[in-house]
Image (tube, rainbow, N blue to C red):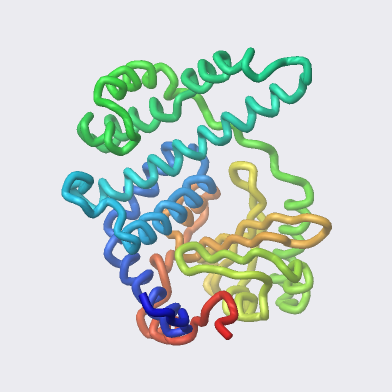
Amino acid sequence: MPNRTFADSDARTAREQWFRYFDIVEPIRGELHRYCRSLTRTIWDAEDLVQDTLLRGFAMTARGDLHGEQSQVRSAKAYLFRVASNQWIDRQRKASREVLSAAVEVSTEIEIDDVKPAIERALQLASPQEFAALILKEGYDFTLEEIADFVGTSVGTIKSALSRGRTKMATAAQVLPVDEENRQLARQFADAINRQDLEGVMQLMADAMSLFVCNVGGGRGDDGTWTEKSVRLATAKYAELQGEALVVLFDSTGVANDVVRIEASNGEVVRLTDYCYAPETLEYVAQELSLEIKTKGYHQPENILVEMIAGPSLPWRSD
């Protein structure tokens, strides 16, 4: 292929296709979110898994993966459920190996070859395949053949996994207490919003803060755009849910319309996750906190999208 520069116009084309893709999969989003919540058993990990699944699904489609007749699934729903299943299984296996590896490193006298069989048995006992297979079968009625394809194994293995998995479904996810620094910074964040001290809000943010708006995108720091558009004229309330420190935002009528998750370090907000375009998460939070909520859909309205698509540039210098 001839050499060519990847230009800002290419970034705009990709962004346009991203939102088109979102509109196409919108009818599936509710079920996908419920599936991810069943897997992760926390609302925050569920939304993270949904975001990763959609991004991976978009990238794999653009790259041409899974397009052969032998690998096609029966619907977009089955395709995204397969992506989510594999994403989650890979995460669980990595986490299990990291925990077991850390345990082995505690004693330098133990040879790794001596504990490999025990590690493998432990991983099998806690197989994420069992959990995913049970949810896919009993919650969404996929066939055994489809489930085997989703998680990359045989039908016989899935049958065994279903039998074992039913005995483990009642296990609750461990929810850690809210980090005290996250709590303090989130309270200060809410107080500054209620004073309409927008400069004070920005001063709480680290210069290189990770800002992520679900489904829309993010970046580093805030040049004032997010603060101006998200918290001007809003009121706020501090809340906690499933181990996370939150700031709930309310419109001028007193109805909640956004939830922000705060992560802090060294006295600054280092990660801010905005769920204003994640309606399933907003509705779940509102139900848990007994709030009335107004959701906005999965992205901005069409007239604003046109401006957004026209504006992006590459995330690196092209000169």
Q: Quadrant of residue 138?
A: top left
Q: Depth check: 93 or 259 in front?
A: 93
Q: Is residue 77 above or below residue 220?
A: above
Q: Depth check: 80 or 3 in front?
A: 3
Q: Depth check: 121 or 277 in front?
A: 121
Q: How many marks?
A: 0
Q: Quadrant of the C terminus?
A: bottom right
Q: Position of residue 97 (x, y in %)?
A: 58, 30
Q: Is 82 on the left or on the right of 313, as rendered?
A: left
Q: Residue at x 65, y 27 (%)?
A: 101
Q: Quadrant of the N terminus?
A: bottom left
Q: Position of residue 169 (x, y in %)?
A: 42, 24
Q: Position of residue 258 (x, y in %)?
A: 53, 64
Q: Is 189 on the left or on the right of 250, as rendered?
A: right
Q: Residue at x 62, y 66 (%)?
A: 211
Q: Position of residue 63 (x, y in %)?
A: 34, 61
Q: Quadrant of residue 236?
A: bottom right
Q: Residue at x 27, y 36 (%)?
A: 149
Q: Residue at x 50, y 24 (%)?
A: 171
Q: Is residue 274 above or below residue 164?
A: below
User: Which residue is situated farthest in the front direction here?
Assistant: 2
